[in-house]
Amino acid sequence: MIGAIAAASSGSADTSYFARAERREAWSFALLAVPGLVVIGLLLIVPVGWLFVLSFIGKDGGVSLENYARLAQPVYVITFVTTFQIAGIVTVGSILLGYPVAYLLSQLSPRAAAICMIFVILPFWTSVLVRTYAWLVLLQRRGLINSWLVGLGIINEPIPLVNNFIGTTIGMLHVLLPFMILPLYSSMKTIDTDYLKAASSCGASPMRAFWDVFFPLSRPGLFAGTVLVFILSLGFYLTPALLGGGRVSMWSMQIATNVSTYSNWGAASALGVLLLVVTIAILAALNKVFRVDKLYGGR
Amino acid sequence: MLTAAASATQIRHYQRLWLYGLCALIFTFLIVPCVLIVPMSFSASNYLEFPPRAWSLRWYREFFDSAEWMDALWLSLRVAGLTTLIATPIGTAAAYGLSQMPERLTKPLRLSFLLPMIVPNILVAIGVFFVFAKLGLNNTVTGLVLVGIMLALPFVLVTVSSGLQSFDGNLERAARSLGATRLKAFLTVTVPQIKSSIAAGALFAFVAAFDEVVIALYISSGENSTLPRRMFANIRDQVDPLVAAVSSVLVVASIVLLLIVQIAKRPEKGAAR
């Protein structure tokens, strides 16, 4: 305020006029975000808040922790273990498959990169449902993959690839891989190739230049992709529900089953709240070393 | 500069054969499930098989002749269209507001806009189902559009924000110093500069609303089933090639959309160079 007055009394140039106006206006710009915040408040905060309350209400209608105490039962523990296993495998798999692709894309000429990008973007654009369905067909007992494996003599008779852990993992890896490639690619694209040239002109071998210069610079993207894939895996519903064949019980499916089969809203909301807490805890831990809003394309 | 870079990559080509090979395999893994569905949809059989023993259009006929499937398709298109119309201006306004407001407000607000991407869908689904049950919004277009807007907002915000990031704010200041009002400067100077980001955001919003299935499993049913909702039920209950036909239509639609985006992007790129 005092600054504004001082600027008004001394400022004659246009710049101070704008600086003052912008400072005054800066706060009013928050209003532009209000409609969106209302939508998110009503459709996300209120429903999830409601579940939060529900999770602390016991069978007798009083406040209790019984819904959370239940989560120590073996059936839920198995679910948690399975979920983390699958999320871990999918995340590692997507790093192993995503890094080379992102690297190649970042090294190609713009035209070649645009063409290769189609292979990443098209799956990204195709509905998850469609892709999951395709895997169901590919991996079934008499599906293409089994007949190839038998034809090549790798296996003697078809092996169960779907309605189990393997099918779920393959399907999820396919759905989530672009979430690894895209942030990696965008962070690799910002790496100035002159750094690599400088490294090699200083006598570094291509290997050394890669590990000492390129890789560290690509870490923000790797970080973003890893967290994104891991978090999305933890809460994934569609693919495990269709490819797990009821044999793979992931966290989100357990929530759904509690609602649809047992009408146990207390247990479902406790599971949901815990899932959200774990997700946010991962992001918060990350926030110490990395700006989370960057993860989703922020500055 | 360009030629130097080109020759540097040419020298490396042969050393990188393993990388090309590996990436070709990964690209195959990524693309095959999206494309393989198409030949399978032309099967004459009652079961899914590849390659089909006999070809026919029967599953397409069944899809396009079925009132139920057509209703579902129409419902999804309406929901996605309405979502796009509403979410794009709301998200663009928020992105612009965020780019102008004081720093300390930016981060918490940005995070709240990203919540729909962070909170697991299944949790939102049962929560929204619960709230909509009280409000009588389950199985309504309004309910589906509201959910669509909420899910689409982060996509619009992120794409428009990234457009604004590369936009030089001084251009807008210049317009204002020449007498344009804030709104006029935004509409005539800023918007044309970021229009491709806004269009991309709108497209994302459409796709996000159209493809949504987990929440629809709860808040849409019976006659008010969206297309993905109906597909999900069909996949779970009876695996026949009908869904392959529907999926092929969707895959072709996404290829067409992708091509439109690529073509729309081109002139702008050329102008920038």
Image (spheres, coloured by chain):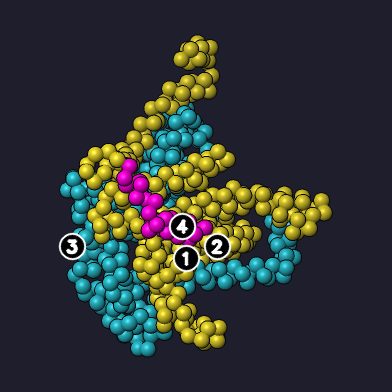
Chain colours: A yellow, B cyan
Chain assignment, label 1 = A
Query: In the rendering, at what x and y percent does residue A278 appear?
Result: 44, 46
For mark 3, give the secondary structure.
helix
Nearer mark to the viewer, of 3 and 2: 2
Camera-side residue of A196 and B232: B232
Do the residues under discs 3 and 2 have CB atoms within 8 angstroms? Answer: no
Between discs 4 and 1, the one toward the N terminus: 4
- Report the side of B59 relative to A215 (left or right): left
List the residue tagged with mark 2.
A93
Q: Is residue B127 above or below residue A96?
A: above
Nearer mark to the viewer, of 2 and 4: 4
Q: Amino acid at mark 2?
A: Gly
List the residue tagged with mark 1.
A169
Q: Taking the image as drawn, is residue A224 in sight?
A: yes
Query: In the rendering, at what x and y percent does residue A167 appear?
Result: 44, 70
Do the residues under discs 1 and 2 have CB atoms within 8 angstroms? Answer: yes
